[in-house]
Image: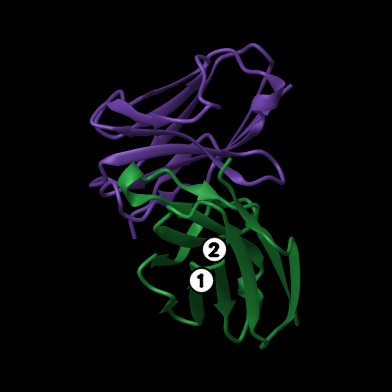
Chain colours: A green, B purple
């Protein structure tokens, strides 16, 4: 079946360095992608999204890159801070099919001081 | 900032008992969702709800599950006869429209013994 998956289950990064989290998706019809951050004991928190007609979108300290050719999504976090320690999920959806999100398996980011 | 609130934060129940998880979505939102996350696994879609009826549901959402919006503010998930495998974190979410960003609550942890 269709699925969204992550390459790295855990990423350790030094404070101040940049982080890159990767995600592969298999539903080529998906046209909207979102990155969520989930801190321990909390719900997913929206970070940034990107539509399929774009290949890059920047937010505050975060950048999402979309490569539709290889069905790959990445989240770049600049100058990683201790507060960035969390599990990051990518999610995809087909907007014409409503708001059902398919989540990936998650990557844990650990920021070392 | 408006937020989705969920109660209880944690519920422990015996197998076979009925459980009701409650959610108060953001007040001007029209679309409501339940997702669940088994410990250590990815977030999974359960059901979406609009205009007082289910708009989509997953395979997980079988006859043991039901949703209801009993008044103008609450959105509930009922599990009629809980099983051990229902133990999970249940997240409520809402969105202003069918394509808009989902806002998640902090979750209700259900433990079935």
| Residue on which disc 2 sits | A71
| Badge 1 element | strand
Check the picture and name the quadrant holding the C terminus of chain A: bottom right
Check the picture and name the quadrant holding the N terminus of chain A: top right
**Left or right placement of residue B109 versus residue A48 in this view:** right
A28 w.r.t. B45: above or below: below
**Left or right placement of residue B77 versus residue B52 in this view:** right
Outermost residue to the front: A69
- Residue A38 seen in the current view: no
Q: Nearer the viewer, residue B77 or A96?
A: A96
Q: Are marks 2 and 1 in contact (CB under 8 Å)?
A: yes
Percent position of residue B33, x then y: 41, 38
Q: CA distance from mark 2 to mark 1?
A: 6 Å
| Residue on which disc 1 sits | A67
B91 w.r.t. A93: above or below: above
How many marks overall?
Answer: 2
């Amino acid at each position: 079946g269709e699925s969204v998956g992550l390459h790295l289950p855990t990423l350790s990064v030094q404070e101040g360095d940049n982080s890159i989290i990767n995600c592969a998706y298999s539903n080529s019809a998906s046209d909207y992608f979102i990155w969520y951050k989930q801190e321990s004991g909390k719900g997913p928190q929206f970070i940034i999204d990107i539509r399929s007609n774009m290949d890059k979108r920047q937010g505050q300290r975060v950048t999402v890159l979309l490569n539709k050719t290889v069905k790959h999504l990445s989240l770049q976090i600049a100058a990683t801070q201790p507060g960035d320690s969390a599990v990051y999920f990518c999610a995809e959806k087909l907007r014409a099919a409503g708001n059902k999100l398919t989540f990936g398996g998650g990557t844990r980011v650990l920021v070392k001081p | 900032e408006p937020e989705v609130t969920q109660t209880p934060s944690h519920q422990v129940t015996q197998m076979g008992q009925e459980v009701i998880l409650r959610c108060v979505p953001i007040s001007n939102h029209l679309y409501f969702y339940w997702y669940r996350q088994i410990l250590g696994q990815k977030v999974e879609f359960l059901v979406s709800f609009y205009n007082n009826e289910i708009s989509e549901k997953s395979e997980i959402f079988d006859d043991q599950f039901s949703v209801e919006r009993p008044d103008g503010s609450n959105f509930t998930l009922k599990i009629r006869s809980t099983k051990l495998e229902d133990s999970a974190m249940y997240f409520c979410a809402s969105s202003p429209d069918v394509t808009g960003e989902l806002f998640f609550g902090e979750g209700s942890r259900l433990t079935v013994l």
